[in-house]
Image (spheres, rainbow, N blue to C red):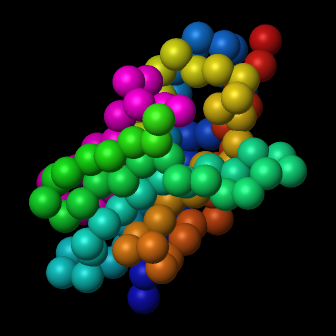
Amino acid sequence: QVQLVESGGALVQPGGSLRLSCTVSASIFDIYTMGWYRQAPGEQREWVSTITRGGHTDYSSSVKGRFTIFRDNAWNAIYLQMNSLKPDDTAVYYCNMNSNYWGKGTLVTVSS
């Protein structure tokens, strides 16, 4: 049974940094891609970043150069390092596996 649990969301000032974590309970053999999505208040959920089984990473244009996705060697967790945060980054951030499984999200608020 796949379980994804996000953590690390917080209130942070503009320009600050935050690291999100997603604990992954799944067989490593079932993981093809892991990713982060976000949903701002009143908006649709949007893709943020992906890391594939082979280690390839990709980012939306709105976060490229500021966010970094990475994982631990055993696929027990993935992370999203967020730097130079902006108020527009305020959202609930969700972890995703294989475009099928979702965590419950963690709230990031960027505000002074």
| Lateral position of residue 96 relative to residue 8, left or right | left
User: Which quadrant of the structure image shows residue 59?
Assistant: top left
**Residue sitting nearer the eye, 59 or 100:** 59
Where residue 49 appears, as percent x and y from the top left, is 42, 48
**Residue sitting nearer the eye, 23 or 41:** 41
Residue 6 in view (yes/no): no
Q: Residue furthest right?
A: 42
Residue drawn at (56%, 67%) of the image: 103
Q: Is residue 3 above or below residue 23?
A: below
Residue drawn at (73%, 57%) of the image: 44
- On whether residue 109 falls in the magenta region, the answer is no
Q: Residue furthest front?
A: 61
**Residue sitting nearer the eye, 60 or 102:** 60
Q: Quadrant of the C terminus?
A: top right
Residue drawn at (53%, 32%) of the image: 62
Q: Quadrant of the N terminus?
A: bottom left
Q: Which residues are magenta?
A: 62-79
- On whether residue 78 falls in the magenta region, the answer is yes
Residue drawn at (31%, 66%) of the image: 33
**Residue sitting nearer the eye, 5 or 42:** 42
| Lateral position of residue 18 relative to residue 56, left or right | right
Residue 77 in view (yes/no): yes
Q: How many marks?
A: 0
Where residue 38 appears, as percent x and y from the top left, is 62, 50
| Lateral position of residue 82 relative to residue 58, left or right | right
Q: Residue furthest bottom?
A: 1
Q: Is residue 109 above or below residue 78?
A: above
Q: Is residue 8 above or below residue 22?
A: above
